[in-house]
Image (cartoon, helix red, strand yellow):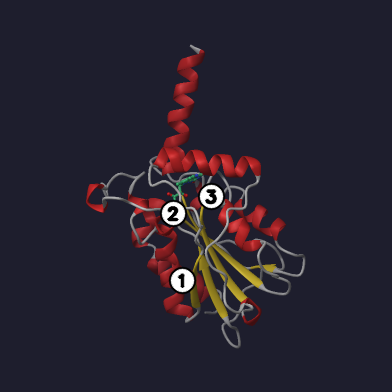
Amino acid sequence: MKQWLAAALAVWLLAAISGCGPAPAASVPAAPVSAAGADVPREGHRVLIAYFTWAENTHVEDPSAVDPDASTSASVLPPGNTARLAGWIQERTGGDLFSIRVKEPYSSEYEECLERAAWEKQIGSRPELTDRVADMDSYDVIFLGYPNWWYTLPMPVMTFLESYDFSGKTVIPFCAHGTGGLAESVEDLRAALPESARVGRLIGVYRPDVDSAEPRIAEWLADAGW
Ligand SMILES: Cc1cc2nc3c(=O)[nH]c(=O)nc-3n(C[C@H](O)[C@H](O)[C@H](O)COP(=O)(O)O)c2cc1C
């Protein structure tokens, strides 16, 4: 009986994180995060759009063998979900795009990637990145995109956050996620930033809704004055 319960829980967890289950309320709209997270008007800002996505952090031996309809495998082929959101943000803000990439790519096997990500979270790992933003000092608004990995930011995004001084900058999160929504990612982001950094109005997009999310992204940006 106990074994059955454990198996059922495991299936439920996999369905939840792979996005097979129903969309939770948390996945819905852009919402204010903090009083300091006021909208940032477009004028006079230099914008960076930094994002992390599995597809740009893995290697697929045989792309033709990937079933694009399988919810667990689709993400390994570019463009990843977060990259698609980043592209739409770039088109509207004219900012510079930066892909956060690890030196040691993740497995393109879902289970293996899950396992490594879980381990990295557990030990608070900071995977090494391949590149640095050339002139981070010159940007004052950073759109930061990430998938929800194990209820929070992927650990390479933590490496990114700890690689620069974000004092006085505005960070605007956007997240692609499964049924877990944004989970603890925004709280963890806030905690990783210095006090003087602001967290702008975020957006979370539930994985199956990414295909049709461009108008929502446009609306979110327009609402914030972009
Ligand atoms: C290692 C890993 C862990 C994940 N953990 C979660 C989770 O805890 N909650 C959730 O809602 N989705 C989770 N997901 C699903 C991703 O957030 C979702 O598929 C996202 O759209 C992937 O974006 P990407 O294509 O940019 O990588 C996880 C996916 C992976 C690969």
Q: Judging from the image, what secondary structure is the residue with disc 2 in?
A: helix
Residue under the image location 66 percent in, 79 percent down: 137
Counting residues from the start of the chain, the first of labels 2 and 3 encountered is: 3
Label 3 element class: helix
Q: CA distance from mark 2 to mark 3?
A: 22 Å
Image coordinates of residue 71 in percent, x first then y, are: 34, 45
Residue type for callout 1: Glu
Q: Which mark is residue 219?
A: 1
Q: Amino acid at mark 2?
A: Trp
**Residue 32 visible in rendering:** no
Which SS class for mark 1?
helix
Determine which residue is flagged by label 2: 54
Question: Is 56 above or below relative to 119?
Answer: below
Number of residues whose C-alpha sits closer than 10 Å to that of mark 1, classed few (under 14), some (14–19) or many (20 or more): some
How many other residues sit within 10 Å of disc 2, few (<14), some (14-19) or many (≥20)?
A: many
x, y percent for residue 101: 49, 61
Residue 53 position, x and y percent, is 45, 58
Query: Upstream in the sequence, badge 3 or badge 1?
Result: 3
Q: Is mark 2 within 8 Å of ligand 1?
A: yes
> Relative to 39, is 117 on the left or the right?
left
Is residue 94 rendered to the left or right of residue 164? left
Name the residue beneath numbered marker 3: 26
Identity of the amino acid at label 3? Ala
